[in-house]
Amino acid sequence: MQAKNIIGFIGAGKMAEAIISRILRVSSEPVKIIASDINPKRCSYMQDKYGILCVPSNIEVVKSTKTVFLAVKPQDMDKVLKEIASHATADHIFISIAAGKKIASIESYLQKSRIMRIMPNLPVMVGEGMIVLTCGKHVSTADSRKVKELLQSCGKVLELSEDSFDAVTALSGSGPAFFCYVLNAMATASASHKLPYKTALFMAKQTMLGTARFLLEKNIEPEDFIASVASPRGTTAAGLEVIDKKKVNKIFAEVITAAVKRSKELSDTLSKSK
């Protein structure tokens, strides 16, 4: 089955499914997917829904293609790496989505292969994900470009150094949940002022989406956007005054710091468990 247009996935969970679905939907060239999963029901589901080949053998995936996503849980990664190590070659590119699992740890098993690590988030499922990529010592510029082009079907892709990944995890990995918390709080508060909750939630979602698109497409800084909306003694200014008094900036600083700290703890635990 070996071919350039075959992409492998070891692990066929939710994030793997999100990436697979986008690649199949958006790719400009025909692509075949081979995936492995220890759950037979999951394999059947993936085959039925996406028409991919899903097998129980991780080694079969590695033998079938030179581009393989490592989409297993971080605590299961070492076991998988030991299993496939003797079949990994210098021609293989392995792309890990396991949070906290550092490239050096993966390279210690797959010593000849080219290793990349990515941090995607759930909006990948709708093609609006934020994916950050970092590369190991054997990865070439051409390798990086190839994988970036592949992942652009899932959203925006940035390449950063691995030492930024704890902050990346906190911002774009956990960030969607933080945004949803704020969004729900705004909708709930609006519902207490004669606006049906479902209507308020719909309005809040569209307002968040529209604001993000405006900032991206117009390349405007958040502070400039706020200044353009907040007229003196107006409704926006009244709300912003409360935000400033309650020190919401400080709260979000603590939120991100807590998430970064936890990411570091998880990464350290995985490093020690090897």
Image: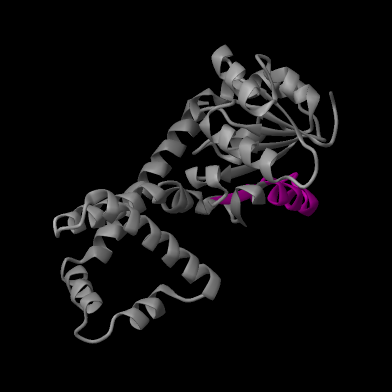
What residue do we see at 34% from left, 53% from top? 202
Q: Nearer the viewer, residue 219 or 174?
A: 219
Asked if residue 105 lies left or right of residue 233, the reply is right
Asked if residue 77 lies left or right of residue 272, the reply is right
Q: How is the image coloured?
A: one colour
What residue do we see at 25% from left, 75% from top? 236
Q: Horizontal and vertical percent for residue 108?
A: 65, 32
Quarter of the image holding residue 246? bottom left
Q: Horizontal and vertical percent for residue 205?
A: 37, 55
Q: Horizontal and vertical percent for residue 253?
A: 31, 60
Count of numbered labels shown in the rendering: 0
Name the residue at the bottom extreme: 232
Q: Horizontal and vertical percent for residue 86?
A: 75, 20
In the image, residue 249 sits, relative to residue 99, either above or below, namely: below
Q: Is residue 139 magenta?
A: yes
Q: Nearer the viewer, residue 174 or 220?
A: 220
Q: Nearer the viewer, residue 193 or 117?
A: 193
Provide the residue span drawn in magenta.
130-150
Quarter of the image holding residue 23? top right
Q: Is residue 144 magenta?
A: yes
Q: Nearer the viewer, residue 204 or 86?
A: 204
What residue do we see at 63% from left, 21% from top? 48
Asked if residue 236 lies left or right of residue 145, the reply is left
In the image, residue 218 sits, relative to residue 266, either above or below, namely: below
Q: The N terminus is located in which quarter?
A: top right
In the image, residue 190 sits, relative to residue 26, either above or below, namely: below
What residue do we see at 76% from left, 27% from top? 88
In the image, residue 47 sits, relative to residue 214, either above or below, namely: above
